[in-house]
Amino acid sequence: MARTLDQKLAILSDAAKYDASCASSGGAKRDSRDGKGIGSVTGSGICHAYAPDGRCISLLKILMTNFCIYDCAYCVNRVSSNVERARFSPEEVVHLTLEFYRRNYIEGLFLSSGIIKSPDDTMADMVRIARMLREEHGFRGYIHLKTIPDADQRLIEEAGRYADRLSINVELPTDAAVKDFAPEKSPDRIRRAMADVRVLKEASKDKTASGKRPPKFAPAGQSTQMIVGADGANDATILKTSTRLYSSYNLKRVYYSAFSPIPDSSAILPLVKPPLIREHRLYQADWLMRFYGFEAGEITAGRGDGNLDLEVDPKLAWALGNRHLFPVEVNRAGKEVLLRVPGFGTKTVTRLLAIRRHRTVRYEDLMRMGANLKHARPFISLPGWSPRALTDSLDLRARFAPPPEQMSLF
Amino acid sequence: MRSVDIPKIGSFEAWRDAARALLVARVPPEEVTWSHGEAGADLFADNAPLPQGEGAVTVPKDFLPLARLAVWHRDPERFARLYTLLWRVQTEKRLMGDRGDPLVARLNAMAKEVGRDKHKMTAFVRFRELGDPGAARRQFAAWFEPTHFIAEPTAPFFAKRFGDMEWSIFTPDLTVHFDGDLRFEPGVVKPPFPEDATEELWRTYFRNIFNPARLMPKAMQSEMPKKYWKNMPEAALIPELIATAPARARAMAEAMPTIAPARAAKVGASLREAQALRAAGQDALETALAGCRRCPLWENATQPVPGEGPLDAPLMFVGEQPGDQEDLMGRPFVGPAGRLFDDTLNEVGIDRDKAYVTNAVKHFKFVPRGKRRLHQNPNRDEIEHCKWWLGIERERVQPDLIVAMGGTALESLTGSRKNLLKRRGQVEACDDGTPLFVTVHPSFLLRIPDRVRQNEERARFREDLARVRAMVG
């Protein structure tokens, strides 16, 4: 029996929910003020709703189909699973995107798909949907296409002309884990596909001989996702992989997705509560690497097992482990040093440096500047505050770590 | 005392004009009272028209962006606070940058609240279709209850986004209409709208995109406060989704793995067959090289970069290792050093397509630095391990002459890189007797900062390659 649009939407959004990325930021700015199309991209994405899992709903995140010929153990849509299957027609995806968009439910479309027939066939259908939206319907909202690594480079090139962002999932932190859990996927092909996207994007920035600018290619860049907690990789390994990916392929973001039990799970994977705190700590560590000048090695050095401290955030954990560098003289320390003070964000540091140019910063100023003083206090000294022995007190960690608590499984 | 009433439509411009006039007239902040859309002004006010002096008012560049936001705040003191700040920045030049100052801090906090409210309006307005979906200009309307007076400054966002629609947003303070142009009218009480079937699809999406194993209602509520829920069609589902989540997650965890459907084995078999066919079509050397784990350099690289060129080439060039671009494209000498190499080949008349071009080490060695990769020289071990692959390439091509470019190539081919600059330009012999011409690596030329010296070295490199050309005829 043919399924209704509502039934397909239920199946194909359920199938897409394990992908963490939903960002709609960084696209090329454009709008429809000329009245000839629909949609705009402002540069910073908008979360139009939040689900009770706390995740932002910014894009219509769906699979074109959840039929799949691959057998990736961590994936609910693998060929050996017994989930219900469905397939949207390209027209249905276009219809849902536009109708949701017109009601201001979404910023655009995030389209992914199971592999049907072949990687090229699947990618060609996805590109067709993006082309229909852009060319037939004048859609100027955001499009994110999940790229299939094995697809022909010409299809990826075409995808990049219509999409704001392309992404290719590395899936798991190590090549060995990919081979174990996703036997049909090739880690080599995934790396090469990300390299192709970077090369195509850089080529689109070069002017041609005639001085004309080539068409834009994925203006919001590329991103990737890693599943955390399905294999045995520790956080040091994960962050080392992220460092490699950021430097090699100019990624906008690496998403970490706590492995979550799925309906009809494979027998070889852990059926435990998703490690959400670990996932959160990885995002914090990722942030420290990208905006605070930290390196992967120093963030994960503290515990000896290569994992992040789950009880306190990685910046605080680093400061607690390197107390000989504190307290910091707020009025004298350099920018790099201030960025390493727990409780000081990049904005606080910028503001501090601005004030310092014409007067001395006092403790009272910090309170009005957005610093988290509960975290910062033991690590700073300035007029109006001295930590005295607090910096080196033995119970300092206990002041921040949550009291031991009976963790309930569900 | 002077009193100034700011109208509800066009508040920012009205405040700016009034504040400018007051400042030119040197009226101090404590002598002004401000109201918002109330014609009944202070009875004791001295409302003689302000002198129309054309005095130039200058403000620091970050004052106007702050005023443009804070002016829409619901705080009844907003106009007065802004005027006080405007008054003070005339003499306190650095005031705007001082987040420690209570007035600056307060107005910045107000601006931030307005900014957040505007952002939430762009996010949480929900349109319903009013007219015929087949119309050339479709009609939509929404009811929204913002915290601050933000409908006017947020309206351009909707005008830019929904340019081909006709729409209205009704709020208690102001109504916005758009039909190609924006119009503002006074606020209304919530009007009735017809049902819209698309809302049911949206609720289906909201229900299914939620992962019950990751229940975090607090995170949801901090970003989507309850005050907005009543005008969002999906929000009605939230209590039920939260209530049933633990049981759904438990059911997933407890469910036994099922037996794979019969078609799974068949699909898997044909997929493996297709992949095997594709692998069979590949060059055996490339396939073997792709699996190389002789040293750890593969871990960070994208791919090994094999040599390129005809297998009967009389001439073989050996460089150091792939660089950033070579690693991405899987081809030797395609980055900046490769371009210099190509140019020089052209100048001396060597056809690169007729030579075999390769590297001593096949994977790119680098250290990651933020968004860049810094090249590192391969060490003795890595060169030694990779010699195996260079050996196979030499075996296959059997060139009449090999050109070693740089120390790494020289070390790989002769066992020593010592005295490279003394040996350059000479012809040595490889272990199997193949003549080996020694020269520098083109990237060495790129690293010379001094222009004159660089040109000299380029000329010498060109001379070297010209000799190579003469040797192979």
Image (cartoon, coloured by chain):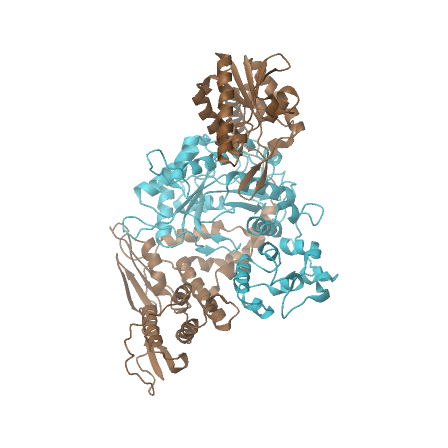
Colour of chain B, in one word, is brown
**Residue A311 seen in the figure:** no
Q: Is A292 placed left or right of A392 in the picture?
A: left
Q: State how many labels appear.
A: 0
Residue B248 position, x and y percent, is: 56, 51
Q: Vertically, is A238 above or below B34?
A: above
Q: Is A103 placed left or right of A282 in the picture?
A: left
Chain shaded cyan:
A
Residue B236 position, x and y percent, is: 45, 60
**Residue A183 seen in the figure:** yes
Residue A139 or A382: which is nearer the viewer? A382
Q: Is B459 placed left or right of B83 in the picture?
A: right
Q: Residue furthest left?
A: B136
Q: Vertically, is B359 above or below B395?
A: below
> Which image quadrant for residue B380?
top right
Residue B157 position, x and y percent, is: 35, 57
Q: Vertically, is A369 above or below A242?
A: below
Q: Quadrant of the N terminus of chain B?
A: bottom left
Residue A175 position, x and y percent, is: 60, 34
Q: Residue furthest bottom?
A: B44
Q: Vertically, is A238 above or below B19?
A: above
Residue A112 or A5: which is nearer the viewer? A112
Residue B373 or B318: which is nearer the viewer? B318
